[in-house]
Every structure is written in C-alpha cells, then in structure tokens.
Amino acid sequence: MTVGLGIFGAMLLAFPHNGWSDPQADSQSDPADISRLTELVRDSSLAELQSRAMREFESGSWFRSDASKARPHFRAAAWLYDELWRRGLRDPALALNRAHSRRLAGDLPAAIVALNEGLAAARWDRPLQIALEDARSAVAYPTHSDLATLCRPAPKATIGTRMSPIEGQLIAGVVWLAACCFITRFVMTRGAGWLGFAGLCLAALAVLGACWMHDELTRDDDESRSLVVVIHDAQFRRGNAETFPLRLDGQSRLPQGVEARALTRRGEWVQIRLASGVIGWVPEKAILKTNN
C-alpha cells in the first residue's frame, strides 16, 4: 500500500522538525545526484523506493527555510515517486505525492502533469481535483489581458468525476435490487403503487447508464489528443516558425503551466489547442507531454 503524504505533505513545511532525523546523517545518497539515485534504485523494491522517497521529502522539509538546500531533496523525492509510477504503482495517493514534490521543488508544469496523469487513472479523486485547481491558479497569467480565460480549463463536473466505477456499480445494484423487490410485492399484492415504484427504479437505472455512457464518450474524445503543458514561457504563433505572426493579439507568449491538447507536429513546432478552442503553434522544446 502506498504511504501517501497527500495534502498533508504540502503542509509539513509549516510544522517544526523536532524529533526528525538529521538528513545530513543519511549518507546513502546525494539528493542532487539523480544518476546515483538511478544506480541505487535499480534493484530496489517498491517498499524501499517509497521509504527513500519519504525520507527525501522529510529532508526537504527540514531545510524549508533555505530553498537552495530544500529543492534538491524535493526533486529527488519527485524522481523516486516518478520511478514508482513508471513501475506501475498508480494510485491517487502516489500521484498526489509526485505533484507535491514537484511543486515544492519549484517545477509547477511537472506538478500539473503529475496531477493530470493521476486523474487519468482516478478522475473521481477529490484531493487530486482540488490540487489541480490550486496548481492552475498558480499559473502566472498577465493581469491586463484575458489570457487566463482563454487558457485555463474549466473544472469537469460529470458523473465520472463525482464517483468511481465501483461506487456507480454499487448504486446501480441497490437500485436494481429495489426494483426487483417492488416487482415482487406487485406480484404478491397486485398493488399498482408497487409497480410504479419499480418503474421509477428502472428509469433511474436508465438515466444512470446514459450518464455513464455519455461521460465515457466525452472522455474518449478529450483523450484522443495528448495533453501537453507549457514548461517555460512559449511563443504562440499562427504557424510553425518565428516568422509567422502572433496567434493572440498583444500576447506573444504563453506562461509556464498552461495546459493544451497537441494536434500535430511539424519540424520543431507543435500545433496545440487551448481550453477555449484557440489553435496555434508553439516550439516543441517548450512543452511537456503527459504519459497517460
């Protein structure tokens, strides 16, 4: 089971570190040396990776007053959580840990990617939804333009984001059982009211099924294009070269953290679609793709 820091993990910085082990006494690795981490974790079990990731996160929290010392530890923790994710341990708690580590390491775009990947696996998870909205609010949009309106995705409110498939199946099972009971009572008593109750249950099942079907079709359409996140202020143009005019009047660049859907690639440029539907081109090196 994943030991999750969750939202509480982001709050560790606000608490005293009395009783924590001194991170400088941990001589197993240099947190800034990712190549050494690669060697250390090559034969490590999932439990060992989880333990090391939490130690790195604690070490970063120990140095919370000095970002230059804290961020290498958070980067190391993020790398370890990424390794767990690559090995197939994909649950909401791990996704949240990845995102918090990236955010505290100063990498907002990677945090947004981690949250989107987590929601692709568990889109009904409320803590992930809240963390993503918080990360989106941290994107530095210009205050004198409507760029935020054009770029920021609206929170999704569908049946699939409000309950898990298991919860949906349980609800459907209970309603079906109730319908069977009402039909049985109708057969026994011939009371028309029981038949009416059964009809309402069956209608509720039909509505629930239609909502799930519509949600799945909408999701398939959304995910037919890869999600990308701008990793540094990127040019947004009408074509795949710097000679093309700007796509948005008065706005030469998209800030880091903007989410979009990749449409096509040409040369070193990628055509993307913003949340508002506006289509333009950005340099490929300026975006980070999700791996859902």
Image (cartoon, rainbow, N blue to C red):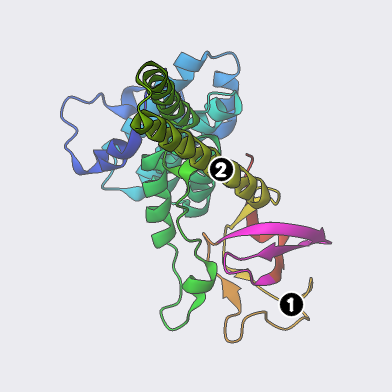
Badge number at residue 13: none
**Label 2: which secondary element:** helix
> Hey, which residue is sitting farthest bottom in the picture?
250
Residue at screen point 48% across, 72% down: 149
Q: Is residue 268 left or right of residue 86?
A: right
| Magenta stretch contains residue 119 | no
Residue 87 vs residue 181, the one in the foreground? 181
- Percent of width and height locating residue 210: 56, 43
Query: Looking at the magenta stretch, what is its main secondary structure?
Result: strand
Q: Point out the stretch of residues depicted in magenta.
A: 259-279
Distance from disc 1 to disc 2, alpha carbons, whole Å, reads: 40 Å
Badge number at residue 238: 1
Q: Is residue 269 left or right of residue 83?
A: right
Residue 77 in view of the camera: no
Residue 63 quadrant: top left
Query: Mark 2 Cα within 10 Å, few/some/many (few <14, many 20+)?
Result: few
**Three-letter code for the amino acid on which mark 1 is drawn:** Arg
280 vs 20: above or below:
below
The C terminus is located in which quarter?
top right
**Three-letter code for the amino acid on which mark 2 is drawn:** Ala
Residue 286 vs residue 121, the one in the foreground? 121
Q: Which residue is mark 2?
A: 210
